[in-house]
Amino acid sequence: MDNNKNEPLFVNPLEASKGLTINDLNKYLPALQKVDDLSMTKDEMRDGMFHGMGLEGLKKIPNNSIDLIVTDPPENPRKDALEGSAPVTIQEYFEWNELWISESHRVLKETGAIYIICGWRYSGMYHSLLSNQFQIQTRISWMDANSNDQPNLPIWKNNLSDIWYATKSGEFMFEQKPVSKIDNRENLPSNFWADMLGFGLSAKDNQSDNLPDEVINRILKASSFKLNWVLDPFARTGGIGIVAKKMGRRFIGFEINKDKLILAMKRIDSEEK
């Protein structure tokens, strides 16, 4: 009997998951990198997307090694990890966020920064949690035409999203300069992104991440350089990573949902060709 190890993992011609074909699964599943197998030192970092919980992935990152964290945390961290699981309580959600934010503080360099993208319901919670360890610099507001975190009620329609920007210390870079050396404050960008009002997603934008590429582009341009390490603990289909790699940054992403991770690998692969 011929045990051909190059045989495809799947042969069903039907689409396996939205955006993925059986050929995609055969190609990318064998190349899947797991958080459990991840080992890094400050001198030997690895970029890429890794399968596993964001919190567990952060624990594998060395101290003071990441330049920038940009992420849109899930509102139900159990959903992708355990299909059909009950939503977390507000207390559980607070404690979970407290853990990964604490790990984020540990892995960031002293000049590092974090951007948390969120809807209105949990914006105050992130303000509180970040202020315990970070120096909050500002809250950015923009009109998210694709926002879906509003309950289905006949009241004010929610189209506003927040981005909390905080730094590990008072010594950080902004707009390619040390913040202490920025003299002309009149030309600094506003934290109200009025030019992005009604900025929806086009067909080429982040199809599953629900964020226009321009949001990520603006963050990376303001708070990172080429070859900087950018990390997203909740990478979904890799939207932040794709923009980061386009801009010459090194990217580390974690995602617990295998289908989303494979789709991210496919998207990043197509961008690099």
Image (tube, rainbow, N blue to C red):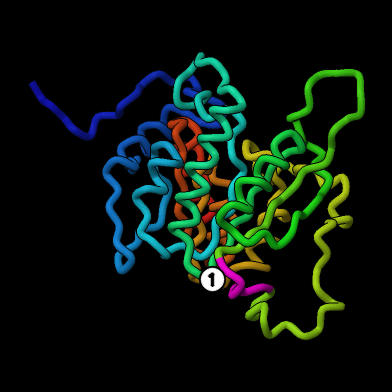
Q: Viewed as shown, does residue 89 lie left or right of 99?
A: right
Q: Viewed as shown, does residue 115 lie left or right of 190?
A: left
Q: Viewed as shown, does residue 201 lie left or right of 90?
A: right
What residue is at 34 percent from the left and 42 percent from the top? 35
What residue is at 53 percent from the left and 30 percent from the top? 77
What residue is at 52 percent from the left and 35 percent from the top? 95
Which stretch appears magenta? 169-174
Of residues 5 and 161, the one drawn nearer to the viewer in this rendering: 161
Task: Name the spot of residue 92 as percent of width and height, x first.
Answer: 54, 28
What residue is at 91 percent from the left and 19 percent from the top? 154
Of residues 146 and 186, the one drawn nearer to the viewer in this rendering: 186
Q: Amino acid at mark 1?
A: Thr
Of residues 164 and 253, the one drawn nearer to the viewer in this rendering: 164
Task: Name the spot of residue 3 as percent of width and height, x first.
Answer: 12, 26
Above or below, comparing residue 201 to residue 93 in the picture: below
Q: Quadrant of the N terminus?
A: top left
Main SS of residues in magenta: loop
Q: Which residue is mark 1?
A: 111
Whether residue 212 is in magenta: the answer is no
Identify the residue at the far left of this view.
1
The answer to whether one can see residue 269 in this image is no
Task: Name the spot of residue 143 as percent of width and height, x first.
Answer: 84, 45
Residue 134 lies in what quarter of the image?
bottom right
Q: Secondary structure at mark 1?
A: strand
Task: Name the spot of residue 54 as percent of width and height, x first.
Answer: 45, 41
